[in-house]
Image (tube, grey):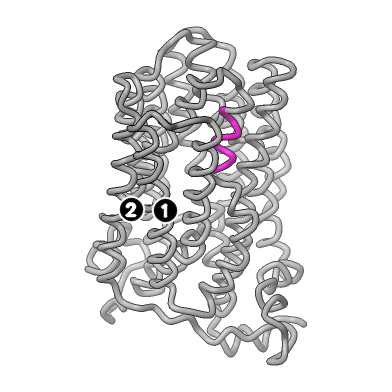
């Protein structure tokens, strides 16, 4: 655990002074880079094999679909057991899946079915690691630096959006998608090295709403049950679900937008996806310490801007305007998601935080549902109506989010006190 010393809550780079956090953060950036190689190469390969907007969107769905099933049990495990071991298990599954995908592509055995199956397997590895990773990394620094650690962790994720898609697009353009999948394998191995050398962070005694005799399944659902008694956290989670449900439409069908609307190839797709990453990095760098007091208004404004930029993106025919809209969507995506994530974490009692974050991740896991829906609409009514409808959906969620008021004084209570204070 991080060394004990006085820290400033406004020290944005403060977490980097702690070796354990710094190592995980740096190697995590490599892991994110591999993920975005996958997110670029996979959907574009599906586009070249099938030409179907639905199949392209299904490829994105497959990467996130396992979260709908595995997130809640993974969140409960992150509260009950050693989070580092969960990370190792998830990254091993991801590394094996990515290596098989690279081999199938290199040997010419890649088919739409194989691509979907291995993408599902990659998604399973990610579903195992996500709740543990979101709660483990902030525990490597003092509580006063938790929000900064969350933001820096998000920054590394967004920085990878710039370089990863461009490299992935170049590999696909030169007929070497297998290299994109191979680098994704190596990225997971790098993260495994960092995690294996990191300290154990034992989960705290859970407690539950039903007493010590509650079943494991009941304890697993404590995150959902807790939301019944915290209106603010519940609204944040519901808003997250609505946002990701509609916002993913543009991201899922970006290969089709680039190929069909702009008439460009995979290299241009990688570069344009990189502009989304540029906006995301700016968003992470400018976000600083997520403000609890102003978070609700920022969430709403970010969503409204994201939805508007999405509609403009699918209507324009000029690459420069498309790049500008993608930069705006990347910026506002990070502002919204980072603020939601931080607000939920700092308001969640420590004893149930892993399971609340699991519910938050489950809300973000609306991506496969949103991807499938926009794919069906685009296949039926056309690409422009499908993506435009998703953008307008984001605007509607943003307007509703204007009602959110995040009070000061997050509920970051200690175990015993928070358990006794929570209503049954």
Q: Main secondary structure of the magenta part?
A: helix
* Residue 134 drawn at (x, y percent): 46, 62
Q: What distance separates the C-alpha of mark 1 from that of mark 2?
A: 7 Å
Give residue 188's mark: 2
Q: Residue at x 41, y 27 (%)?
A: 273
Q: Are marks 1 and 2 in contact (CB under 8 Å)?
A: yes
Left or right for 152, reference 72:
left
Q: Tell me the SS state at disc 1.
A: helix
Tell me, yes or no, whether the highlighted magenta stretch contains residue 246: no
* Residue 93 drawn at (x, y percent): 43, 57
Above or below, 417 against 165 in this view is below
Q: Tell me the SS state at disc 2.
A: helix
Q: Give the image quarter of residue 230.
A: bottom right
Above or below, 263 against 284 in this view is above
Tell me, yes or no, whether the highlighted magenta stretch contains residue 58: yes
Left or right for 104, reference 238:
left
| Residue 286 in view | no
Task: Magenta stretch: give its range.
Answer: 56-62
| Residue 240 in view | yes
* Residue 417 drawn at (x, y percent): 60, 88
Q: Residue at x 42, y 20 (%)?
A: 323
Label 1 or label 2, whichever comes before in sequence order: 1
Residues packed near mark 2 inside 10 Å, few (<14), some (14 to 19) or many (20 plus): many
Residue holding disc 1? 94
Left or right for 383, reference 291:
right
Above or below, 196 against 232 in this view is below
Q: Give the image quarter of residue 242.
A: top right
């Amino acid at each position: 655990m991080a060394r004990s010393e006085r820290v400033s809550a406004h020290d944005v780079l403060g977490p980097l002074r702690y070796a354990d956090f710094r190592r995980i953060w740096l190697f995590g950036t490599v892991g994110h880079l591999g993920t975005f190689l996958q997110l670029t190469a996979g959907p574009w390969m599906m586009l070249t094999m099938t030409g179907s907007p639905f199949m392209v969107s299904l490829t994105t769905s497959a990467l996130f679909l396992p979260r709908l099933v595995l997130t809640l049990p993974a969140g409960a495990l992150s509260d009950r057991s050693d989070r580092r071991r969960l990370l190792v298990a998830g990254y091993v599954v991801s590394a094996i899946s990515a290596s098989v995908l690279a081999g199938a592509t290199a040997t010419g055995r890649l088919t739409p079915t194989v691509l979907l199956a291995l993408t599902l397997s990659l998604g399973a590895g990610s579903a195992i690691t996500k709740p543990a990773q979101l709660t483990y990394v902030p525990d490597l620094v003092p509580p006063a630096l938790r929000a900064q650690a969350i933001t820096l962790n998000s920054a590394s994720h967004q920085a990878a959006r710039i370089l990863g898609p461009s490299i992935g697009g170049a590999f696909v353009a030169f007929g070497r998608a297998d290299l994109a999948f191979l680098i994704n394998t190596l990225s997971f191995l790098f993260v495994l090295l960092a995690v294996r050398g990191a300290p154990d962070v034992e989960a705290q005694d859970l407690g539950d709403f039903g007493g010590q005799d509650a079943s494991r399944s009941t304890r697993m659902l404590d995150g959902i049950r807790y939301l019944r008694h915290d209106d603010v956290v519940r609204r944040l989670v519901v808003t997250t679900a609505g946002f990701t449900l509609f916002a993913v439409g543009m991201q899922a069908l970006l290969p089709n937008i680039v190929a069909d609307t702009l008439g460009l190839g995979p290299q241009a797709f990688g570069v344009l996806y990189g502009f989304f990453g540029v906006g995301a990095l700016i968003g992470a760098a400018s976000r600083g310490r997520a403000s609890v007091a102003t978070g609700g208004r920022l969430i709403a404004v970010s969503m409204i801007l994201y939805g508007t930029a999405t509609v403009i993106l699918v209507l324009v025919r000029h690459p420069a305007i498309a790049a500008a809209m993608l930069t705006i969507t990347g910026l506002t995506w990070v502002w919204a998601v980072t603020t939601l994530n931080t607000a939920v974490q700092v308001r969640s009692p420590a004893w149930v935080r892993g399971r609340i974050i699991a519910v938050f991740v489950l809300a973000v896991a609306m991506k496969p549902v949103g991807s499938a829906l926009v794919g069906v609409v685009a296949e039926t009514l056309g690409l422009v109506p499908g993506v435009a409808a998703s953008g307008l959906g984001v605007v509607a969620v943003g307007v509703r989010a204007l009602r959110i008021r995040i009070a000061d004084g997050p509920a970051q209570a200690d175990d015993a006190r928070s358990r006794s204070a929570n209503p049954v």
